[in-house]
């Protein structure tokens, strides 16, 4: 695949709060895969959360304070790569809305323009090529809502997945249906969220796949948690971590 | 169910295996049918852009268009009535019926009449309202309300309908044959059409330019209701007005494609006047009742105004992961699903219906399919802000009803933590050590009702980055 942009020499990496606390391996894999293409990755230690939890819960002032912090921390004019469709969508599409009328709207817009979802960056900017060294495996793919509908990057993610020659992709019946995570939705309406995730888990189980791969750790945490509670054996893994394993023959 | 907390309705719906099966099956079919008529993504997008523009243009001139509609209708001989509230609307309908000394009304499908709770009101005044749309007929027999705005009896499967007919229609045998069920309904209704003094219908679009009422349907009952009885009363929400006749083709294509996955409905009725001299059919009188019921207040707010673009196609219901699991009754109000979640809290107030705005994962499936591109997730977010009074001044009823110091404090603390990196790192490190021993209480308990306990990583990404020497500036 030919990249659509010139390759930058430096990029920022926004790790997301969930990856920071729960899935650091996914974050490291995403970073290593960028570095592998000869791009230097900068991880500002002042970063925290994109602000989405408050933004979706009726607390825009608090969301703005946290968002403003990220904009300051990622100050240089280089791409910001985000290993989550949801956080990337927040930063790219919702910051300009959140800052409407604020003094620093121009900064928010300029920042938003630099945001890339990880798989989008790997395909559109770096044009990566992977060689699969892993043993044959059957996996399935979950399209997270904001990667699909706001960032519109699912084709990029799948393009990466398809490069892995020994990976058989078994599609879900309802691939693009929400897994029920929805951030605070999962604890404000546990029964609804639970019904959704259990259906997702059933759908995955029916494919006979050993793993479900996705580009968002919120969905993965939700799906893996529900699967584990019910004793289903499949694993849930972030795309970057999966690719890292495959190209190293793990 | 309207008087019960939403959560109880949800629990009950989720526990009803038959209901869930009926919805999953029916909604899946609707999704496939819609996909088949909108198979060309680019063309669909173009069409949706046109639909959006038409409704936006109409809304931008709404007061003017409504006056134009009234003038055009009046010129054509249609009598126009304005109802600020549902109570006024009911009263107007009753007065028309009483002025003709009618005892029976045949009704085509109309969600606005549901909004007015017209049937119950008329029954209290000794007037029988007979639903003639097949779905409405079924639920009326069973004493229920619609569970979907397009297919009101969709929560019932064939066997359940067969049972209702057998029990409630005198002399009806038990049959699951669709043709036979249809025949039972037809035989029962045919007679009523001739006997009724009044026909009542909804309106899909009202054309200001020509004073035309457009009504689409598939069963012919709508045409019967609007042509057989001597008097026709049409009821509509004031957002149904469009500028020109030429706006109709794209809107109809969008409405039918989205609603039922058809290219065109079996009947497209364009009603422009009562029966004229020399005409062989049609009612002698046509009345148009235009209902406000909170709409003009919604109209004042430039963002929330987008709610009024809705053409009531119902496709957001069919694609909603929440609606398809709990069905329409669980919402507890007339309009269920995503459109109900944005409309109902604005009409009924946030105290009564605000919970609905929070019962969404904001997945965006509704916005993706909405034929007039209503940004439903953004409006849900706005209503959440309104609930905590964190949006700029507005006239949303019940604004600020969810405000409480505990939650505000929690979010303030969250923001403080996430703007103070060292404190944040310390907290994450601490959670990495003891997080797995947290007692399952509060939010964690709610999470763990359906999932195992989340496992904090022993070393956070921040720490791993430092240890592995990745650049930090
Ligand atoms: S909100 Fe959009 S999708 Fe939902 S009923 Fe209205 S027009 Fe149809």
Image (cartoon, rainbow, N blue to C red):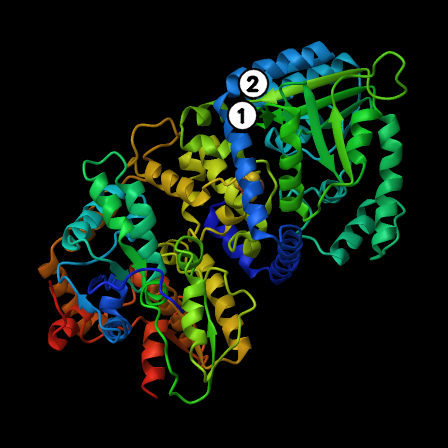
Nearer-the-camera pick, B318 or B198: B318
Quick check: A55 above or below B196?
A: below
Counting from the top left corner in percent of width and height, residue B465 is at 15, 72
Residue B132 picture location, percent across and down: 78, 36
Residue bearing the label numbered 1: B58
Q: How many labels does the image show?
A: 2
Name the element at disc 2. Answer: helix
- Pointers 2 and 1 in contact (C-beta within 8 Å): yes
Residue B269 coordinates in the image, percent (x, y): 75, 30
Local crowd size for mark 1, using a 10 Å CA cut-off: few (<14), some (14–19), many (≥20): many
Local secondary structure at mark 1: helix
Say if A128 sits above or below B413 in the image. below
Is residue B261 shown left or right of residue A119? right
Q: Which quadrant does the N terminus of chain A fall into? A: bottom left
Residue B209 visible to an observer of this rendering: yes
Near mark 2 (Cα within 10 A), the count class, few <14, some 14-19 or many ≥20, is many
Classify residue B357 by image quadrant.
top left
Ligand 1 image-quadrant field: top right
Q: In which quarter of the image is the C terminus of chain A?
A: bottom left
Q: Is residue A217 left or right of residue B69?
A: left
Q: In the orientation shown, which residue stands out farthest toward the left?
A: B422
Residue B360 falls left or right of residue A12: right
Whichever of callouts 2 and 1 sits on the residue coming sooner in the sequence is 1
Identify which residue, B13 or B280, lies in the foreground: B280
Q: Residue at x 19, y 47 (%)?
A: A68
Q: Name the residue under label 2.
A: B65
Instruction: Choose top left, top right, bottom left or bottom right for residue B463.
Output: bottom left
Q: In this view, does B121 lie above or below B109?
A: above
Residue in front for this viewpoint, A55 or B388: A55
* One can see residue A56 in this view: no
């Amino acid at each position: 695949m030919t990249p659509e942009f010139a390759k930058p020499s430096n990029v920022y990496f926004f790790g997301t709060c969930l990856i920071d606390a729960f899935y650091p391996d996914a974050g490291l894999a995403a970073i290593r895969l960028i570095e592998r293409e000869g791009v230097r990755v900068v991880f500002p230690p002042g970063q925290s959360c994109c602000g989405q939890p408050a933004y979706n819960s009726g607390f825009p002032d608090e969301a703005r304070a946290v968002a403003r912090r990220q904009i300051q921390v990622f100050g240089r004019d280089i791409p910001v790569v985000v290993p989550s469709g949801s956080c990337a969508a927040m930063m790219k599409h919702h910051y300009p809305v959140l800052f409407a009328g604020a003094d620093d709207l121009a900064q928010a817009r300029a920042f938003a323009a630099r945001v890339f979802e990880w798989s989008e960056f790997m395909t559109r900017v770096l044009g990566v090529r992977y060689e699969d060294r892993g043993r044959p495996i059957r996996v399935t793919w979950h399209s997270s809502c904001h990667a699909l509908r706001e960032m519109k990057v699912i084709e990029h993610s799948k393009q990466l997945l398809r490069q892995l020659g020994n990976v058989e992709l078994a599609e879900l019946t309802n691939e693009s249906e929400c897994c029920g995570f929805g951030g605070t939705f999962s604890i404000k309406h546990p029964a609804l969220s639970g019904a959704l995730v259990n259906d997702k888990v059933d759908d995955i189980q029916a494919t006979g796949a050993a793993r479900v791969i996705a580009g968002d750790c919120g969905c993965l945490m939700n799906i893996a948690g529900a699967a584990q509670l019910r004793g289903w054996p499949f694993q849930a893994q972030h795309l970057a971590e999966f690719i890292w394993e495959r190209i190293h023959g793990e | 169910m309207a008087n019960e907390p939403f959560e109880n309705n949800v629990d009950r719906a989720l526990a009803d295996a038959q209901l869930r099966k009926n919805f999953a099956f029916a909604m899946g079919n609707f999704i496939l049918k819609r996909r088949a008529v909108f198979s060309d993504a680019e063309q669909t997008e173009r069409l949706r852009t046109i639909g959006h523009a038409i409704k936006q243009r109409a809304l931008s001139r709404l007061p003017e268009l409504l006056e134009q509609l009234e003038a055009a209708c009046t010129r054509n001989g249609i009598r126009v009535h304005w109802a600020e509230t549902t109570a006024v609307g009911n009263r107007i309908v009753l007065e028309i019926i009483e002025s003709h000394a009618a005892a029976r009304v045949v009704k085509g499908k109309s969600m606005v009449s549901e909004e007015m709770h017209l049937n119950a009101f008329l029954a209290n005044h000794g007037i029988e309202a007979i639903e003639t749309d097949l779905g409405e007929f079924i639920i009326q027999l069973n004493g229920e309300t619609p569970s979907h705005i397009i297919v009101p009896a969709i929560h019932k499967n064939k066997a359940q309908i067969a049972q209702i007919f057998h029990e409630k229609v005198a002399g009806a045998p038990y049959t699951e044959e669709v043709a036979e069920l249809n025949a039972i309904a037809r035989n029962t209704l045919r007679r009523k059409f001739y006997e009724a003094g009044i026909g009542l219908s909804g309106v899909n679009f009202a054309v200001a330019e020509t004073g035309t009422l457009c009504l689409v349907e598939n069963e012919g009952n709508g045409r019967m209701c609007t042509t057989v009885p001597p008097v026709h009363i049409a009821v509509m929400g004031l957002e149904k007005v469009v500028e020109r006749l030429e706006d109709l083709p794209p809107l109809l294509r969008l409405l039918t494609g989205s609603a039922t996955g058809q290219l065109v409905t079996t009947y497209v009725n364009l009603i422009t006047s009562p029966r004229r001299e020399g005409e062989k059919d049609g009612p002698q009188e046509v009345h148009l009742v235009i209902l406000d019921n909170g709409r003009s207040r919604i109209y004042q707010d430039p963002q929330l105004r987008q709610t009024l673009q809705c053409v009531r196609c119902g496709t957001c219901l069919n694609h909603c992961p929440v609606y398809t699991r709990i069905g329409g009754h669980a919402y507890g109000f007339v309009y269920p699903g995503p459109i109900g979640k944005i409309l109902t809290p604005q009409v009924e107030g946030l105290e009564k219906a605000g919970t609905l705005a929070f019962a969404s994962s904001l997945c965006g499936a509704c916005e993706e399919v909405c034929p007039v591109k209503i940004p439903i997730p953004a409006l849900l977010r706005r209503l959440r802000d309104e609930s905590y009074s964190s949006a700029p001044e507005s006239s949303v009823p019940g604004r600020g009803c969810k405000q409480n110091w505990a939650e505000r404090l929690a979010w303030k603390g969250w923001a403080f933590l996430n703007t103070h990196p060292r404190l944040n790192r310390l907290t994450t490190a601490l959670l990495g050590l003891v997080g797995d021993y947290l007692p399952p209480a509060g939010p964690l308990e709610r999470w763990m009702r359906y999932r195992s306990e989340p496992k904090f990583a022993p070393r956070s990404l921040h720490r791993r980055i430092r240890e592995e020497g990745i650049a930090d500036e």
